[in-house]
Amino acid sequence: MTEIRFAILDEDAKKEIRRALLKAVSLPGYIVPFASREMPVARGWGTGGMQITLSIIVEEDVLKVIDQGCDGSVNAVNIRDFIVAATGVETSAHTDEASLIQTRHRIPERPLTEEQILVFQVPYPEVLTTVEPDTGRQKQIHAHREYSRLWVLLYEDTAQFGESRISNRYPVEVNGHFVMDPSPIPRYDIPRLDNNPALLLFGAGREKRIYAIPPYTRVKPLVFEDRPFLVESFPGQCCERCGANNVFLDEVHGEDGVHYFCSDTDYCDNHQKRTDHAA
Amino acid sequence: MSYVAVKGGIDAIRASRSLYRKMLAGGFFGDEAPHPTQLLAIDRIMSEGALYSQQLARQAIDEAGGDLLEAAFYLRAHRSTCRRAGVADPIETGDIRCMRRISATFKDIVGGQVLGPSSDYLVKLFSREQPDGEYCPPGSAQTPVQRLPSALGELRKQGMIMVPEVYEESPFDITRYSPQSPYPRSALMQMMARGETGAMLAFAYTSMRGYGDVHPTIGDLRLGMAEVTCTHPFTGNRVRVGEIRVTAVETVGAFKKDPADGKLRLATGFGFCFGFNETKAIAMSILDLALTYPGYSIGESGPAASSEMIMHHIDGVESMGFTNHFKLPHYVTFQADLQTYARAKKHHD
């Protein structure tokens, strides 16, 4: 077997993905098809994000990979090990040290900067899938910005349950134009997409789609004017480890009852350090 | 090897069984032969993995502990590291050196019914006995491989078979461009050539038994060796790359008005894959028939006639990958689910 090249993908593939990325950045929220390659991890396990990361990564990058907010999660460990083996780049668990962050299901708690790129792993890139599975008709709906069926979906839920049942992958309008699937991040992370200084890139390997939110772009959840957009909250709870009470918490059911911990482990470590210093 | 009528083919059937056992005993395909009892597994994953390499396929089966979905995935992952060297010349099915070629449309065809090595005529009971031994019927050809015209050639010559209009200058390549609806036929064909055998079989089966109206007749099924050639990128000469095992099949469907001239013609579907895999090739030809001529069928709206359905749901690496990803943690999304559930419950109950 030949020696593995830098970032494993052949150069034509990288070029193609970079071109798709440029188009995606130019048209915020627009879904760009690309010829997804198989990665040594199965499609559906983050290969879209991985292909973006491998196409844009350079030797100077410091890489952070998280799953559910955690650097130590199996998926994050696998992907990080693989990218390091294929590139030799430095890694860090600290959000502020990383130049390139690949994530599944979360946005780090610490605000991102203009110097950072956040790459999302995406299972369902098409926000319309639940209301229109035909990809040809999906394109027409986006072209006409005819999102009434999404609104009907939201309305039906609101009429029955008081609000939409969509807990994650909540539809967002990007730059006042396309409606987009933000990947399965919780509602808590939706407002944090808005006007974010970092470049946000989304890759769906199995579905062969790439899209993007450029820095400082308006991102709004699809909600009725007279209804508030409710996000997850944990009233009366704080992280048992670091004491943080204004972040997304993991609920852990133990024999001795329910415990709460920060979902973002790096945030938790830092917050604990700061608390220790203060004490 | 050949037999004139389906009756009286006892000699041919005994020879076919003998040949099949010989194929699984090894040495049948020359020095490159892989582990012979894994032959059809290797063929299946070379096709689903979209990479013709018997050595790597065998290695993949070992790495995957015999899980063929996983083994095909090894081949696909390896492909991603390889730069494209060039594009091979089209393979003419008439040039395939056939080891087996049968037709269900006519009793007698040019070149005869060649049973070749097949498990079709075996009694599926565990047995160490090999009653046919090294059976070679009297008067049969010494070499089991030969070039044969399509059994549908005569019908085609008489203008009885529909020729689909080709809108594409060159075939679509789904490995370089993500296909967009409406899908060109070549994109669907490529997807199916790489498709997972079981998935394609299930979709094809729906169209045969209730969710479609495809009554296929196998016009020409052939298994054999196809020569692969290409134009050398530097010298510009036509060079022979090697020879591959392939399966090709044409099935005949219903007839309808040909939009080209309004005359009645028969529709056909085509199936083709790496290696010997009759089930997959036949399923592909049925799906091609259902997709290309949906108007020929009352089951136009059945799943097998939906290009969206076939394009996105027959790839083993994709469907297996996504199914298994549900083992990954979903703490965050489930936490979010529980909170919307709690709020809805409060509102509703």
Image (cartoon, rainbow, N blue to C red):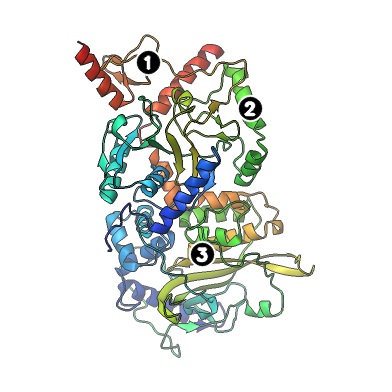
Give the residue at mark 1.
A246
Q: Which residue is the site of mark 3?
A: B281
Task: Name the residue furthest top.
Answer: A236
Relative height, residue B345 to residue A113 (above, below): above
CA gap between label 1 and label 2 equals 31 Å
Disc 3 secondary structure class: helix
Q: Residue A270's spot in the image, x, y percent?
A: 26, 22
Q: Chain of mark 2?
A: A
Residue A38 percent across, percent down from the top left: 40, 52
Instruction: Determine contact: label 3, label 1, CB under 8 Å.
Output: no
Q: Callout 3, which amino acid?
A: Ala
Foreground mark, 1 or 2, reads: 1
Q: Residue furthest right?
A: B262
Please state which amino acid type lies under the numbered disc 1.
Asn
Up-down: is B39 above or below A276?
below
Closer to the camera in the image, B324 or B180: B180
Residue A248 pos. (x, y %): 38, 21
Cα distance in 3D space between marks 3 and 1: 58 Å
How crowded pointer 3 is (Cα within 10 Å; few <14, some 14-19, many 20+) is rated as many
Q: Nearer the viewer, residue B239 or A267?
A: A267
